[in-house]
Amino acid sequence: MGKKVLRITALICLLVFILTLQTGMVVAAPTAKLPNIKILATGGTIAGAGVSSTQTVGYKAAVTPVDALINNVPELKKIANVSGEQISQIASENMTNEIWLKLAKRVNELLSTDDVDGIVITHGTDTLEETAYFLNLVVKSRKPVVLVGAMRPATSMSADGPMNLYRAVVLAGSKEAIGKGVLVMLNDQISSARDVTKTNTSNLDTFRAPELGFLGYIQNETVSFYRQPTRKHTVDTEFDVMNLTELPRVDIVYGYANNTRVMLDAAVAAGAKGIVHAGTGNGSINVNVKPAIEDALKKGVVIVRSSRVGNGIVTRNGEFDDDKYNTVVSDTLNPQKARVLLMLALTKTTDPQEIQRMFWEY
């Protein structure tokens, strides 16, 4: 009986094969569903153009619209269902708090739907790390959000933008990136928004996390993570910008030899609610500036001690009596990222002790 069933099955398979040859009918193999990725464009070098194929500095940034960026990389259609939206068209040194709020709200709106699996944000490299960290604190989704840029304009003979964009879409559509917080993808390297910084004015390999390292790499379409962010981000933060129309003013004051109180006083006079002091070494403050710090604190201005060094922990009570003066230390955040966190902290509280807790957690 068993042999008879096998003969009948074989005969049926043979008949189906003959029918397929005669009719030309091809039975397609099932294909994996492509992720839906939204590309939000803000401008920058990745959308820039030069006057020649050899111009890599002095070009005009933010001239190519998002649809053209997508069309210039037709390979994107093979890895994702991609659509674009223009949020702004600026060189990133001109980024504003208003654009940050607009971008954050749009990201949260898109990720709250089932139609979007991940988001890629094209951005100029000058302030990319700040936008990335801002979003890392206010995006309310575990879905991937990836910031990407370029160091050479699209007209360059060795433009890095198209490949960076391709890799960013791969990353945003990957299951591996879910829950990792906001990511930065350039030069095949995956970085955490909190740790990454621009380290060179013009080299392709400029984005690095010098002490804490990359999260992983992309090779072809393979995403490989080797470590994970440990600080709270996205859905685990206490910050909500959906109803905010503005952010508190926070300025950065730089420390240097023979420093005076002039710039810190000017920031206070301009209405700063918080000031990040980018001190020398371990966040040191010049003796001439300390009276200005005291005066600012008496007026309710929150002072955060960071460091111009760019790496390392700023030690609480190490170079300044933070407990006595009720100042805050930035932990490992550089001055520009300390400013981002301080702005968001000030939307919740002006208590320096509570703000210090946030700097330890985020």
Image (spheres, helix red, strand yellow):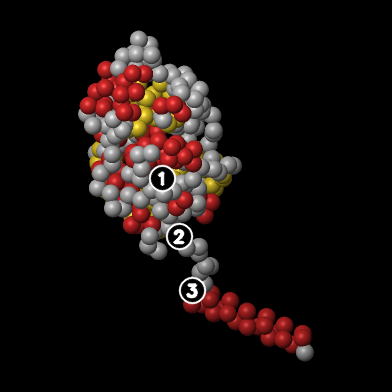
Give the residue type at disc 3: Gly
- Which of the 4 image quadrants contains residue 124? top left
Q: Secondary structure at mark 1?
A: helix
Q: Which mark is residue 24?
A: 3
Q: Which residue is mark 2?
A: 34
Judge whether residue 117 can be spotted in this image. Answer: yes
Tell me the distance, in whole angstroms, between the alpha carbons under discs 3 and 2: 28 Å
Crowdedness near tag 3: few (<14), some (14–19) or many (≥20) residues, C-alpha within 10 Å: few
Q: Indicate the position of residue 253 as horizontal and vertical percent values.
A: 33, 23
Q: Which mark is residue 137?
A: 1
Instruction: Tell me, yes or no, whether the two marked residues, 3 and 2, touch with CB atoms within 8 Å.
Output: no
Q: Secondary structure at mark 3?
A: loop
Crowdedness near tag 1: few (<14), some (14–19) or many (≥20) residues, C-alpha within 10 Å: many
Left or right: residue 305 versus residue 63 is right
Q: Quadrant of the N terminus?
A: bottom right
In the rendered structure, which disc, 3 or 2, sits on the residue that comes first in sequence? 3
Judge whether residue 154 can be spotted in this image. Answer: no
Is 225 situated above or below 113? above
Crowdedness near tag 2: few (<14), some (14–19) or many (≥20) residues, C-alpha within 10 Å: some
Q: Indicate the position of residue 67 as horizontal and vertical percent values.
A: 29, 49
Is 30 situated above or below 182? below
Q: In this view of the protein, which residue sits in the foreground, 242 or 321?
A: 321
In the rendered structure, which disc, 1 or 3, sits on the residue that comes first in sequence? 3
Tell me the distance, in whole angstroms, between the alpha carbons under discs 1 and 2: 28 Å
Q: Indicate the position of residue 248 as horizontal and vertical percent values.
A: 28, 39
- Which of the 4 image quadrants contains residue 57? top left
Q: Secondary structure at mark 2?
A: loop
Tell me the distance, in whole angstroms, between the alpha carbons under discs 1 and 3: 56 Å
Q: How many numbered marks have been drawn onto this rendered protein structure? A: 3
Give the residue type at disc 2: Leu
Q: In this view of the protein, which residue sits in the foreground, 8 or 177?
A: 177
Q: Residue furthest top?
A: 258
